[in-house]
Image (cartoon, rainbow, N blue to C red):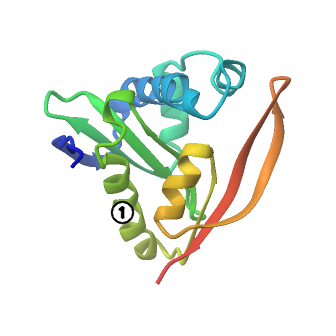
């Protein structure tokens, strides 16, 4: 029987002081975790460098719902964001948090909050890894998107789920 790592985290709403931690999780997640499904060239095109805290706050502080997961020592390990139209723009976990169920807990919190914000449908553009995750959460694949990002071919999947 495989062992399961249990990680204690606190999930809460994003605050301005969280911007640097969110930016760090985003960078490390794409640069480390996405390499399981994308080439080094694709990963670098996806995230060519680190965002600073101000760039991150402009995005996370624009009115969307952002939930963060912090470990026992206060370190950020994952986050998710939900735009006002039901679009899940980002769901990322730090490499050390992958496989611990934290992304699932963040998603479940977003899905629970969505109807209260008048949302009957959630949708996203998912990477290979995220596609597998969202399928387990009941999303349907609407189609594959092949794009050129910073001169590099890369793909993702349009996915959606009707709530209720």
Q: Residue furthest front?
A: 1
Helix, strand or loop under label 1:
helix
- The residue to which callout 1 is attached is 108
Residue 20 location (% of width, % of height): 40, 23
Q: How many marks?
A: 1
Residue 24 picture quarter: top left
103 is higher (above) or lower (below) than 112: above
159 is higher (above) or lower (below) than 163: above
Q: Is residue 164 visible?
A: yes
> Taking 103 as reference, is 23 left or right?
right
57 is higher (above) or lower (below) than 13: above
Name the residue rendered at 48%, 32% in the picture: 57
Residue 25 location (% of width, % of height): 42, 28
Is 113 in front, or is 133? Answer: 133
Residue 68 location (% of width, % of height): 33, 42
Residue 17 picture quarter: top left
Residue 115 location (% of width, % of height): 44, 76
> Taking 16 as reference, is 163 left or right?
right
Name the residue rendered at 41%, 31% in the picture: 22
Q: Residue furthest bottom?
A: 164
Name the residue rendered at 75%, 41% in the picture: 155
**Mark 1 neighbour density, 10 Å: few (under 14) some (14–19) many (20 or more):** few
Name the residue rendered at 68%, 24% in the picture: 39
Q: Is residue 89 visible?
A: no
> Taking 22 as reference, is 43 left or right?
right
């Amino acid at each position: 029987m495989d062992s399961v790592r249990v990680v204690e985290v606190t999930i809460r709403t994003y605050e301005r002081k969280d911007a640097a931690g969110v930016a760090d999780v985003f960078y490390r997640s794409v640069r480390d975790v996405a390499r399981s499904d994308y080439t080094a060239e694709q990963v670098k095109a996806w995230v060519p460098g680190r965002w600073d805290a101000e760039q991150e706050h402009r995005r996370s502080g624009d009115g969307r719902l952002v939930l963060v997961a912090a470990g026992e020592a206060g370190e950020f390990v994952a986050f998710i964001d939900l735009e006002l139209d039901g679009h899940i723009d980002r769901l990322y976990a730090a490499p050390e948090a992958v496989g611990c169920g934290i992304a699932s807990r963040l998603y479940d919190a977003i899905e629970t909050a969505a109807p209260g914000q008048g949302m009957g449908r959630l949708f996203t553009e998912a990477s290979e890894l995220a596609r597998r995750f969202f399928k387990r959460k009941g999303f349907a694949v609407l189609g594959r998107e092949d794009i050129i990002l910073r001169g590099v071919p890369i793909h993702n999947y349009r996915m959606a789920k009707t709530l209720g």
